[in-house]
Amino acid sequence: MNDVTDPVSGEREKVRFSSGAGECAAWHWPGSDGSCVITASGFAVTKEPGTDPFARRFHDAGSGVPAFDCRGFGESGGRPCQVASVVVVCEQDQSASPTAAVRATRRAPRAELVWLPGGHYAPFLDAHERAVDAELSFLRRHVLDSPVASVAFVGRG
């Protein structure tokens, strides 16, 4: 990793890490409580508009947060560039059906599925606060307050 302090925010560092044969670009917010929430905007948008609002809230709650562009997107290397399958669950989503997320939720022992009103980009727009509140609640109940260290993945995109 090459760490460079981001002059814009002063809160996060710009970092790069190896991924396969290439590198991914990321931002890192240091935490204060020993927890870490790894965020990625998914395959529909880069870290700039996709992860900042979520990462800042997780950071404010005490977690260290790396937020990265997936390979082939944004500042990350990889080919082909900007080509993706679309993995989002929103009630009026016209881009991706929630069927796969519902099936995965039923199979995972501690999974929770939160239905958001709106279309494909609702978690980044009108439903942002509800989305990030649900994610923080999940992390507190299943990771931070858990007597046994555990790992959870909560994602968007």
Image (tube, rainbow, N blue to C red):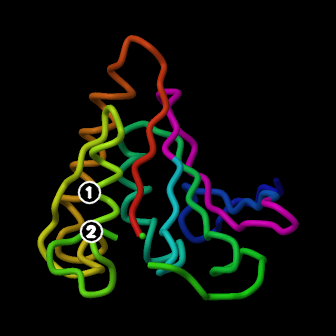
The residue that appears at 41% across and 56% down in the rendered structure is: 155
Position in image of residue 83 (x %, y %): 60, 87
**Residue 28 belongs to magenta span:** yes
Q: Nearer the viewer, residue 141 or 48?
A: 141
Q: Are marks 2 and 1 in contact (CB under 8 Å)?
A: yes
Q: Secondary structure under badge 1?
A: helix
Q: Position of residue 121 (x, y in %)?
A: 30, 79
Q: Which residue is depicted at the point 57% across and 71% down?
A: 8
User: Which residue, given by chain and number where applicable, does mark 1 sit on?
Assistant: 102
SS of the residue under disc 2: loop
How crowded is the residue under tag 1: few (<14 C-alpha within 10 Å), some, or many (20+)?
Answer: some
Residue marked by disc 2: 98
Separation (CA) of disc 2 from disc 1: 6 Å
Please, what is the three-letter code of the amino acid marked with disc 1?
Val
Left or right of 118? Residue 11 is right
Q: Nearer the viewer, residue 6 or 114?
A: 114
Residue pushed farthest right?
Answer: 21
User: What's the amino acid at mark 2?
Assistant: Pro
Q: Residues within 10 Å of mark 2 (few under 14, many from 20)?
A: some
- Residue 16 occupies quadrant: bottom right
Residue at image location 15% in from the left, 80% down from the top: 92
Q: Which residues are magenta?
A: 19-37
Residue 56 lies left or right of residue 133; in this view the side is: right
Reply yes or no: does residue 73 show up in magenta: no
